[in-house]
Image: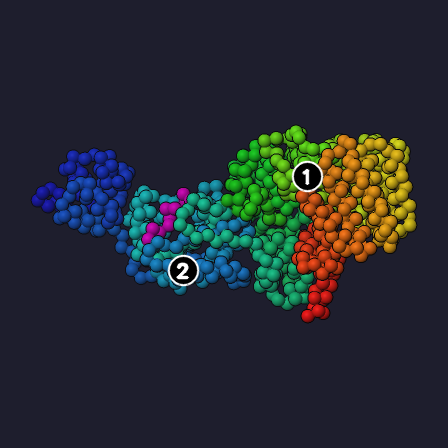
Amino acid sequence: MTVRDGTPSTGDFGQRLRHLRVRSGLSQEALSHASGVSVRALADMERGRTRGPQRRTVQALAEALGLDGAEAARLEKSAAVGRPRPRTGPVPAGGGPLALPRDIRDFTARGPALARLLELAQDAGPGLPVVTVVTGQPGLGKTAFAVHAAHRLAPHFPDGQFALDLHGMDPEPTTPRDALARLLGALGVADAAIPAGTDDRAGLWRSLAGERRLLLLLDNAADESQVGPLLPGSGPSLTLVTSRRALAGLESVHRTDLALLRREEAVELLTRIIGPERVRAEAQAARDLADLCGHLPLAVRIAGQRLLSRPHERLGKLVTRLGAEGRRLDGLQAGSLRVRAAFALSYRQLPQESRTLLRRAALAAGADFSPQTAALLAGLSHDEAVGCAEELTDAGLLQSDAAAERYRFHDLLRLYASEQVDTEDGPEVRDAALDRAASWVLRRATAAALHFDADHEQTEPRSDPDPETAPAGRDEARAWLEAERAQWLASLRRAHDTGRHRQVLDTAEAMHWFSDLNQHWEQWVEVFRLSAASARLLGSKREEAVHLNYLSWAHNSCTHDARAALASADAALAAARECRDGLQEGWALGYGAGALQRQGRMQEAEERLREGVHRLAAEKSPQSRLAELTLLNTLGTLLRETGRAAEALDLHRRSERICRAGVPGRTDRVIRLYLAVTRLHIGNDLAALERWREAETPLRQALGALEAAQVSAWAERTRLHLGQTLAALGHPEARTTLRTARDALAALRSPLLAEATKALAALDDAGAATT
């Protein structure tokens, strides 16, 4: 049927549009360009595939065709006839094709995140719809959280609540076109009325959703391009999106980053699954089980389901089974719930390089790792490793440090990644990766540690494996050595175990001065035990004596194990005498004396120290002068502590004269360091003689020099003694000085902390007594 001008009747929009286009002399391409409507959409309209385009689309076409008001109204009327007429009542929440999944009865924790979503729901208005993205690593319970939240928020969205699984981890995730068809169908749009094209489906969905107060749960999203077309453009709706990826490309969205449960929350979840009686009966086993599950909700749930199906099994039995790391992932499965399967879904989606980096990074030592370590293990460049690590972070498989460029695994993910090394790489590839990383890391550790070598000024670049990225200066070197402590120590072990003993000795020797600045590190015992063993295996008696002396120092100063220190010193003394090395003989006598002194064997300690001073005085090398200074100072300290402070002062004045005379072949920086330590001893001698005012000056001089040299262990020791002297003088700086010393000694885990605390308390008591 047509009207008198030959225009098709009102009800046939496609024929009317084609007639108007031809009448205007426009091709589909020309009309597309003028209106902004795609050529494909125009073709679908004219062929009757799209019978009722949106109102704004019709308006754009009318303007491009130059229609007057009456013609534009008739075109709009014909479009309205073909538009779907969805049901007008609210969509039932408990049924329909996209109904919310059943809520989890024993859902636990996540209170702050739920409260935030409730605030967003209450604030949702007719303007910009609210969208929140729920992200996190596998097993954190993103879907469970979103479903629980949707049920809690449902009363705020009476026009419908829809849940759609986007299958983001599948080989072929749901396409936006198919997802839109399901959403339109859930709103009541008949299949025949759903547009063919993705853009038109998205437009219709936004048009209909914009008029309703809807809650939409898009679960398991693959990426931004999948989610974008599904988000309502206007109206008071709220959309929850869950994804293992960060979906950083989505703009104007809120983010809910789920973290691991706290230990008590993990135990609470276990309690809700198996009941409070069993948890109360084995409270410690329940806490241990939560720890073995890494506080990961999926793992805790699997453990709980396993116990629920075995009502008579003790929690301790499962703890024992999971305690064996190699069997932990096997033990964490119950029915269709498997931790390994959850991880595998994400792993299989990764590109080859990212899979390689993920599994090889599990070989890194310590709680976290740098991109450089990952690059060495994976055989990638630094930039490639950074790109892969960021991709893995977006995928929720790694966690990035908030302040530094470092990454960490969840414990169970590390186990899974380690399994993949065994399965995909095998022992030869794994060993090659570990050797490659160990060699590079030890070369850098050696170069970095030499920044602290007080025997020589560092005037030329050291043999760093990559000079362009090498730490520049002591601050950067210290930062690298501290951040990579676990990695270079593991590399040292590997070098020793694989027979690279020269590299072990070179690294440990380079660490000698750096170790003195970090006496609170108990790892020095292992470092020098390995290097002494490597020297012995190389048959070098002199180096064996050197490193046994270092080991004795570590036992004395780092772990305060006097018995072990004496044994190492005696072994060093035997090796030094065998190779007739007077310098190492003197050091061994000195370290042995320190161990004897700690055991209260003062007379024996004094005898060894005097023998060591005599032996060193006969040596002519610059190293012997420095060793003589050390033993003189140590002997003086022993004399002072046994009530012979005047004799101690004479010895320390002798040390001061040696320092002022200088030591040929040694830098001013080294001599200033020895002079500072000597002045510390002089100040303590004077304090022991109650010559408080005389003691203050050398102690202040020592503190300034030691702080400038960044020798924190000695500087804070000096600050403590200065504070005690100032307290004896009634000086107003005493309290501040002692408090600063106490806090710093606590940070260093120094055994002098108790003395500092006692001195500060005594000062406070004295102040209270005078008020």
Q: Secondary structure at mark 1?
A: helix
Give how far across and how far down residue 356 sits, in percent. Answer: 58, 37
Q: Quadrant of the C terminus?
A: bottom right
Q: Is residue 70 left or right of residue 113?
A: left
Label disc, if present, on residue 121 of the rendered structure: 2
* Residue at 27% from the left image edge and 43% from the top image edge: 49
Residue that numbered label 1 is attached to: 488
- Most frequent secondary structure within the magenta stretch: helix
Task: Determine the secondary structure under disc 2.
Answer: helix
Task: In the rendered view, tell whether residue 704 sits above or below residue 302.
Answer: above
Disc 2 or 1, which lies upstream in sequence? 2
Q: Residues within 10 Å of mark 2 (few under 14, many from 20)?
A: many
Marks 2 and 1 sit apart, C-alpha to C-alpha, by 51 Å
Of the residues shown, which amino acid type is indicated by label 1?
Trp
Question: Whole-percent x and y of residue 174?
Answer: 42, 45
- Rendering quarter of residue 65: top left
Query: Quick check: is 231 in the magenta stretch?
Result: yes
Q: Nearer the viewer, residue 576 or 629?
A: 629
What x and y, as percent, mark residue 757? 72, 59
How far across and how far down the image is residue 676, in percent?
74, 44
Image: magenta residue range: 224-234
Residue occupying the point 68% across, 48% down: 325
Residue at the spot x=19%, y=43% of the render?
63
Residue 76, labelled with which disc?
A: none
Q: Is residue 549 visible?
A: no
Q: Is residue 614 left or right of residue 750?
A: right
Above or below, 696 relative to 422 = below
Residue 18 within the segment the image draws in magenta: no
